[in-house]
Structure formats: structure tokens, C-alpha cells
Image (cartoon, rainbow, N blue to C red):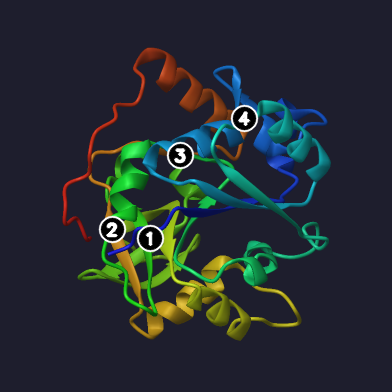
Amino acid sequence: MSNTKLALILAAGNGSRLAACSGELPKPLVPLNGKPLLEHVMTGACAAGIERFVIVLGYHGHMIREWCENRRFGGIDVAWVENPDYRKKNNGVSVLCAKDLIHEPFLLLMADHIFEPATAGALLRQPLGENEVILGVDRKIQSVFDLDDATKVRLEGDRIVDIGKNLKRYNALDTGMFLCQPVLFQWLESAMIDGNCSLSDGLRIMGQNRTFKGFDIGGACWQDVDTPAALDYVQNSLSVRPWPMRQAAEPAYA
């Protein structure tokens, strides 16, 4: 059983597709209903039981750090890591930037993925093997906004056997929430080609080795806020009906 209190947040990208809404702001600071995306992610994680954060910075990282220090999140500890290669390399490199700071199970989150805190809490309570990663997956494929942009996954039972944006055969979607053992770093290193890899590259190898699991989030809500259209969608959704604090069914493996 995982009782981790640690989360790793990837916040290094420049968010070029959201530039029309962000101006000079880094994407994690783009406001959603009056609060930066990163604040939604951090407060949601805290509500799920997280007390410590490692945040990987890149584009305008100083602005994110200053915002967090001025925000004065009470009772939590934040460590910062810089990814100097955020412009040229994929997000697997951002994960590896935190390798020396993480030696225990951790929740991996994206700074632009909004979720219900209860979903993250349910994921944190899942049994996690010593060599495993568990991804929160959504089987409500037809109800997701901007399916073309979503990362797809293919499951066989509770095991994820493939992952990627361009999968032709898939039966669930990647929500951007992962419960990880530090072994993830080793798989990412093994996926490196010319010093670069994506998170999906490493996870795909884990899937081939049967150490990558799926956790079905059931009826819960989430959204990858990667474009102005996605930002408008989630903003309108929250204004019409705030996302409920529902609990995912347990056990709820896909």
C-alpha cells in the first residue's frame, strides 16, 4: 500500500499552444477561474494527502518560484529543480532532472492537468509493487474534450501494454496522474536516444515488461489544459457545475 506524501510536478514547458492566453506568463501560471493552473494542481494534491513537492522548472521558472514563495502555501515543503534543456528535449528529461531528489514512491503530476482531489487520493491508496508505476486512466473515451490531443493507452486486464498519442488501438486515456516507484527513472534512462526521451517512451518499455498498471478513475473529471480551447472548455465546465469530490470505487483497476 502506498502512503506517499511526495509529488513531482512537471512545470518546465513553454506552453506555446497556450500562448494566446498566457502572454509572457509560463503555462503553469495561466489563470483558470482566477487561480493559476499550478495552484489548482498543488491544492488538489494537498487535499489528496500530499505534503512535499518537487517541481521541475524551465520556461520563466523564476516567475513560478516567485509566485509560489509569495503564495505561502502553509505546511508544505517545495524543492525546485531546473531543466536547462526544456526547449529542445521531451518531458522524460524533466522527470530525470528530479532523480537525485526522489528515493521513495511519489505521485507524478503535470502542471497543466486539472483533476478532482478525490481521484488523486484514490490513486495514492492503490497497492504499488516495488517495480511498478500505476497510471490513472479514463475509459470514458467519447466524453473527453479534444480526443485527438489526448494520450491513448491500451490495456490488457489491469496492465497497460502500450501508450502514445498516435495509438490506433486503445481502450482508455492517460489522465496525467501517475503513482510511481523510483524505478521509473531507470526505465527512462534505458529509453534514452541521443540524450532524449519522453515519459511515454519509458512507460512503453515498462508496459512491455508487465510493470505498468492502469487505475480506472470511473466517473471522475479531469482535463489537460494545453490549448485556449481546452482552457475555455474547463473554465465553462467549472462555472456551470463545479467538479464533485466523488470517491473512485476501490479497488478500481482498469
Amino acid at pointer 4? Pro
Marks 1 and 4, how far apart in space?
26 Å
Q: Can the viewer see residue 145 in this picture? A: no
Secondary-structure class at tag 2: strand
User: Mark 2 — residue?
Assistant: 215
User: Mark 1 — residue?
Assistant: 135
User: How crowded is the residue under tag 2: few (<14 C-alpha within 10 Å), some, or many (20+)?
Assistant: many
| Discs 1/4, front | 1
Above or below — where is 34 with respect to 82? above
Amino acid at pointer 2? Phe
The answer to whether the residues at label 2 and label 1 have Cβ atoms under 8 Å apart is: yes
User: Mark 3 — residue?
Assistant: 46
Instruction: Kindly give the residue lying farthest to the front in the view shown.
Output: 75
**N-term-proximal mark, 2 vs 4:** 2
**N-term-proximal mark, 3 vs 1:** 3
Residue found 55% across the figure and 37% down from its top: 225
| Discs 2/4, front | 2
Numbered circle sitting on residue 228: 4
Secondary-structure class at tag 4: helix
User: How crowded is the residue under tag 3: few (<14 C-alpha within 10 Å), some, or many (20+)?
Assistant: many
Marks 3 and 4, how far apart in space?
27 Å
| Discs 3/1, front | 3
